[in-house]
Amino acid sequence: MFFIDINCDLGEGMRTDAAIMPFISSANIACGGHAGDEKSMEETIKLCLKNRVAIGAHPSFPDKENFGRSEMTLGTDEIRDIVLQQLKNFGKIVSRLGASLHHVKPHGALYNMSAKNISLARAIAEAVKIFDSNLVIYGLSGSHSIYEAKAVGLKTASEVFADRTYQDDGSLTPRSQPEAEVEDVNSAVHQALHLIKEGIVKTISGKQILLVAETICLHGDGKQALSFAKAIHEAMEKEDIVIAKI
């Protein structure tokens, strides 16, 4: 039997958050860096509680203008402080609502840069450990994000994507390229099933690569986020794949 966590980036100002909730098991909630404020965090946490969805923090570069998707050159100490401060702010709201924080997943450029940069990955892992060593770090499968989190003693979830395409090295195709996103529902479902059942994804060059798939991501700001979530959830049920948080 196969098990998979379905996570989604939420609390980013989209109108489909509530509709997506029944089809996922974990949520990554924007905590003020690229999107979100106290009100949106509170509303999204309440939706998680209502739907029994695991609550995750989604810290990013402090860059709302570019939705956190532009690379920034910052020192590791500054990165550690940025992540830690966002976790503290988010954690206060989680505690006030009587909820529990389950995981942390960096957003956008911070996520992609840390996947390739050991020092950056270590700084994020250290921030999470300082805040709460029981939290799970969600990171790109096979990347420094996973290895460095494990190195400091944190639990990890190797993440793959249903709505993004891959490069031959296992990285995501940059959004600046035309083939960066999976465009249709059938392709997203096909990619998700192959990753979960076989640990294989086809890159944009046609090469098949192996990836560990413990959690699969959907972007809540995607044009077809809701239809993707519904279709993938339905496909998992048909295939008897158990959907559950890590």
Image (cartoon, rainbow, N blue to C red):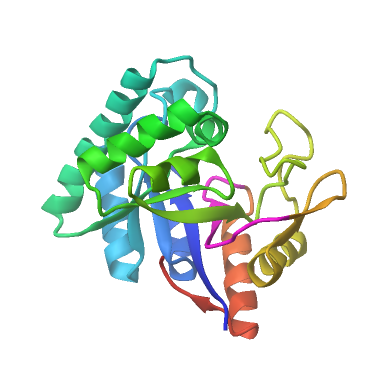
- Left or right relative to 206: residue 185: left
Which residue is rendered at x = 87% and y = 50% of the image? 206
Q: Which residues are magenta?
A: 210-222
Which residue is rendered at x = 59% and y = 85% of the image? 240
Instruction: Let me know if residue 213 is in the magenta part.
Output: yes
Residue, far front: 151
| 50 and 169: which is toward the camera | 169
Residue 12 in view, yes or no: no
Which residue is rendered at x = 85% and y = 50% of the image? 207
Instruction: Let me know if residue 5 is in the magenta part.
Output: no
Q: Position of residue 32 (x, y in %)?
A: 33, 33
Quadrant in the picture for the N terminus? bottom right
| 240 and 219: which is toward the camera | 240
- Left or right relative to 32: residue 207: right
- Left or right relative to 87: residue 115: right
Residue 98 in view, yes or no: yes
Placement of 167 over or under 240, stated as above or below: above
- Left or right relative to 57: residue 90: left
Can you tell which quarter of the image residue 200 is in? bottom right
